[in-house]
Amino acid sequence: GGSETSGSGGASEDGTYTFKVSHVVQESHIWHKTAEKFDGELQAASDGRMSLEIYPASQLGLEQDMVQQMESGSIDFGFLTNAYMSTREDSLNAWFMPFLFSDLAEAAEMRNSEEAREMLASLESQGLVGLDFGFAGNRHILLKEGFVQSPEDIKGKKVRIIGSPAFQSFWDKTSAGPTAMPLSEVYTSLQTGVIDGMDIDLDALVTEKYYENAEYLTLTNHATFPTVIAMSKQVFDGLSDEDQEIIQTSLEKAVDWGVEEAIQREETNLEKLKEEGVLVKELDGSAFEDVSNEVRDEFSAESEIIKNFIETAE
Amino acid sequence: MKFIENVSELVYKIEKGIVAFLCSIILISLTLGVIFRYVLSAPLTWPNETAIFSLAWLTFVGGSMTIKTSTAPTIDIIVENLRGRLKHVINVIGYLLMFLFVSYIFYLSINWLSSPNILIQRSGSMELPMIIPYLSIPVSFLFMLIHVLELLLHSIFPNKEVE
Amino acid sequence: MAITITAFIVLLLIKIPIALVLGMTTVIYIWVTGNIGILTTLPQRLYSGMENYGLLAIPLFMLAGELMNSGGLTKRLVGFAQTVVGHFRGGLAYVNILANMMLASIIGSASAQIAMMSRTMVPAMEKEGYSRDFSTATTASAGLLGPIIPPSMLFIIYGVGSGVSIGEMFLAGVLPGILLSLTFIILIALIGMKQKWPTHDRAKIMEVARSFTTVIPALLVPLIIIVGVISGAFTPTESAAIASVVALISGFFFYREIKLKDTPSILVNTAKTTAMITLLIAMANIFGWMLSFEQVPQTIASWMASLTENPLIFLLLVNLFLLFVGMFMDGIAALVILIPIFTPLLVTYGIDPIHFGVIMCINLAAGLLTPPVGSGIYIASSLANISIGQLTRAILPFLLVTYVVLVILTYVPDIVLWLPAVIGE
Ligand code: NA
Ligand code: NA
């Protein structure tokens, strides 16, 4: 933040900065790699004046804590999941509109859309400067038994989902039984039938080995899963125009790299999963048209940005 | 002195009612969660959040009760082996520091909840306003403040209760 | 940092509740570093420490324990154990261990179990001619099974703090719990051979049958918990809820010992014992954040790495450290403070976090029985009305075998990890 103590971020007399970056994923995750890349770009562009201290895996707190610490300027940057931020800013639900993108590359293209810029700008009232969106893999469905070709196939199945308004709405409408559950219990719960499946991205599937207990993977691409990369407004406003510029361009380069990397990973992860014997099938989303239209209408009514976002994406 | 004692006792009674209620809510909501998932095969989404919010309230209100009854874990090996005046002075200092700390957290929590960004926050599945669980902090720290003040006054004037 | 550490120690020693000390130390740290802006986020962090599904198991297992007691279930379990193994030489001592094992599969805390059993087992053993010292020592030591045989408050807290599955922690505790029970039984047999203890008449087969039929509802509770945990049909939190409901129904309808008017005090007691732990966890959440902010774990990690690269030596050092901490600090308090410091080091040494968690929890539980600070010995000695000194002497052999078991578990991780792995197939 804005203080001058050694090692805790912020400015010193000679205009050098060590910024604190916080996020909630493990060090192997693409978001962490993106943060590291950002550090490199920043150091290069500022001749070593600016660098990052990265705190992974919620070390500095959960997301609600991160936002508050950014508001007060004690953390400088945060990689916040869009799922959490959508409980604070409605328009962010746009990314979760069902079956809007057929793959990750399509989703990532929307990063530079006008609507995405508007979403980022809307965070200002919360003391955040929304800088960019990063991506993890798209969401797919993993089941213990059978593939998903229509809502019928998941009727009454207990599916672990992410706690977010849009995911909740989608899953409620499919007539599956959406269940919120901490990730640490998912592996055993799949194994013992406490749940029948989960809403998941391929990266997590590979690292957490859930396929050992559930081997039917339907590639649904029913939603994408971005991170909102934001900076503390208080800290940002305290920087010179030139430094603000350095930060923005360095981050953009890092995220460009991270998005490409995430798209690559989507492919390599799929290869790995097939090697592990996971049964994979793609979904033709037309059977879900009614459900997804209902969700899209519901959220379009709440936010003009979502409505436009859907139109642009289509 | 008598007044603060009475207030503290009254608060304690209220706290008892609150925690007994919360405990029942935790049990009932999670049991319903299991029944709906297993027996009726229709998982509910509200039990987990309801139970977690109840636990937060239970923790801080119950925590205030453990301060009141001096049952919160402490390291008492040193103080218990002291005698007379020194022990008395250390007790008073201890309660004074506790009083300052609890007041400070109370003050910070009021500041925290007055921020406009609190009201926009909603929970992930029930979309309940987060101010409802958040209020557990200022409310229970206010309760704790009353109890600690009573303990502090009691430690400064230990003879008053004999009168 | 020196000011912060000094403040932490002084505040602890002047008998301020440990939970509040954690919060105060964090505030002092922030003042000293001048990063005042962070203070505004403290209440938020205090709250978010509680946003954890796993923590819900704590009030529910507490409630199950309270209901077992007031519902007369505990009494029946002890009676049943007596009809089964009471006739051996030293029978009542074995009954003590067996009843504690059964109780341990319902109750998650050693202090709770010691308090419960000291009232029933010590007078019973004394009446049959065992010395009071030995009776109290046996009861207090067997109470250690409480947090080792699932369910376990310590394992829940470790799971929540380290991100390890609580269900797997529970499974990992089963074999170590049985191993510890067996070593206690062997120890009792050895002492018994020397001391020519009384034997009890063998219970008639009809008595065993009758005792068994009355104990069935009481046995249901541990059965549900164990089966729930092993089969994974319920999450640990859910099995705690179901166990409470079964205990409530048995106490209410079968044994008719719970009256409607008792329920408020059962609920209030549960809430208070829960809050003692969870308030500590909430405060430790801001304390742990201070440690991360200051990169304390990384500093300790690099210091440890410079001392040794051998995981076995590392574990030995950790065990000695925990033994020392356990002498002065309550196990749960020590656990919540130390988890964020130790768990980041495990990757470096390639130690399984479940293995480490079990060792850490058993070690800190044993601290309840080590002087000068040990709530277990205080509870037992005051309930049995013997001096701390007497009890400490009598308990020493039990403590020694506990540490032997701990060494075995440290060097043979399979005893801990085998069951979770087999069930995980
Ligand atoms: Na137990
Ligand atoms: Na001790």
Image: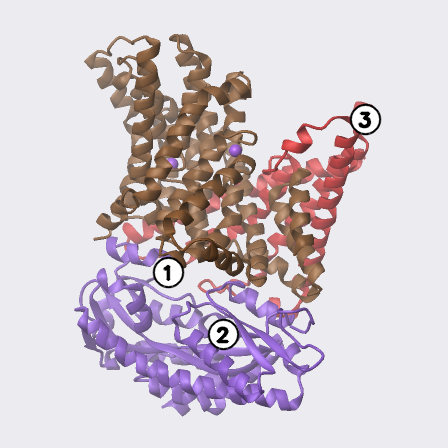
Chain colours: A purple, B red, C brown
Report the disc number at residue B159.
3
- Residue A66 in the image: state x and y as whole percent: 55, 68
Chain letter for mark 1: A
Q: Mark 1 — residue? A: A183
Residue C222, percent across and down? 32, 34
- Contact, CB < 8 Å: mark 1 with mark 2? no
Farthest residue to the front: give it: C307
Closer-to-camera residue (A120/A293) = A120
Lower sequence index among marks 1 and 2: 2
| Residue A12 is at least partly visible in this image | yes
Toward the viewer: C229 or A303?
Answer: C229
Spatial CA distance of label 1 from label 3 is 56 Å
> Are discs 1 and 3 both within one chain?
no
Q: Secondary structure at mark 2?
A: strand
Q: Nearer the viewer, residue A191 or A235?
A: A235
Residue C292, image quadrant: bottom right
